[in-house]
Amino acid sequence: MDAYQNVGIKRRMKRFFRRDGRALIFAMDHGFEHGPTDFEEHWEHVNPRIIIKKVVRAGIDGVMMLPGLARAAGIDVKPNVGLMIKLTSKTNLRPKDDQLLQSQLGFVEDAVKLGADAIAATVYWGSPQEDAMMRQFAEIASYAHDLGFPVVQFAYPRGPYINEKYGRKEDYRVVMYGARAAVESGADMIKTYWTGSRETFAKVVDAAAGVPVLLSGGAKTDNPVDFLKLVWDVIEAGGAGAVVGRNIFQREDPEPFIKALLRVVHRNEDPEEAAKAEGLL
Ligand SMILES: O=C(COP(=O)(O)O)[C@@H](O)[C@H](O)[C@H](O)COP(=O)(O)O
């Protein structure tokens, strides 16, 4: 890779990661991947401009969106906040047999025009359609790297063989495998599942061989401290932070919660202390 691209990738990575090498990123692709019902708990957050303004005000490090939402609300992602555009997706409406495929819904050029700082794509490792997603990722990554953009892989092990062999997709051996596959396929950042313990997540981090590993948030926890504790475990395991959607936009007042998360991610604060400091307890 020549010096220009190398500098481009490094500079853009720094728009997400602070000097401590960690980042808290807001995810908003749920209207497409899960359907707008995900927003019903706090319906005003279905409007990307409303929720993006809140998360930016709270001090989030980055925002991840699909290209269409970035057209609508990318302008609200202030220049000091990293913008990650994801170029693959799927709806929950497609037939069951096709749920293990993410399709390309935008192009690297679109992300560049939208002012992206990083480009993301999902690979369901172990899917019967793994081959198609590997090719898609390779094409996106190759072009993005040529232009000096970092590439994020949502490295999600998913598929019938995984269930048969490991019992669950969150088994650390398979999450670790997905993370390693992401590294070996050229990812600059990895987003993946929680494996259930610090010890096992630390192995995922080791398998990623220096490529930052971010937690994929998951369903909202009733008690906000439970999610703070999860992110604390990720950080203690050597993880680089988290990409969080529902735990933010499904809360009535996401701002103190984000501030508490930032305390845990960047200041190593104990989750309960962080929650108290932001008035959550
Ligand atoms: O990866 C995604 C969906 O995963 P899923 O198929 O629901 O397991 C992304 O659409 C989300 O943005 C990501 O999971 C982060 O959002 P939350 O899980 O924190 O809501």
Image: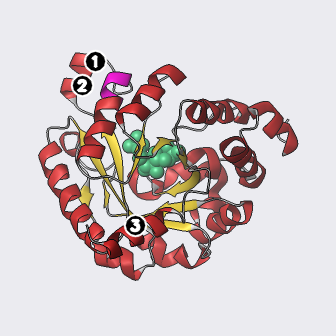
Image coordinates for residue 70, horizontal then vertical, percent = 47, 73
Q: Which residue is drawn at 59% across and 51% down?
A: 24
Image coordinates for residue 157, horizontal then vertical, percent = 29, 35
- Secondary structure at numbered mark 2: helix
Question: Residue 64 in magenta?
Answer: no
Name which quarter of the figure residue 170 lies in.
top left
In front here: 210 or 168? 210
Mark 3 residue's CB less than 8 Å from ligand 1 = no
Q: What stretch is highlighted in magenta?
A: 171-175
On residue 259, the disc is: none
Q: Which residue is drawn at 69% across and 45% down?
A: 261
Q: In which quarter of the image is the C terminus?
A: top right
Name which quarter of the figure residue 173 lies in.
top left
On residue 162, the disc is: 2
- Secondary structure at numbered mark 3: helix
Q: Which residue is drawn at 44% across and 72% down?
A: 116
Badge nearest the viewer, 2 or 3:
3
Q: Distance between the residues labelled 2 and 3?
A: 33 Å
Residue type, numbered disc 1: Tyr
Q: Mark 1 points at which residue?
A: 166
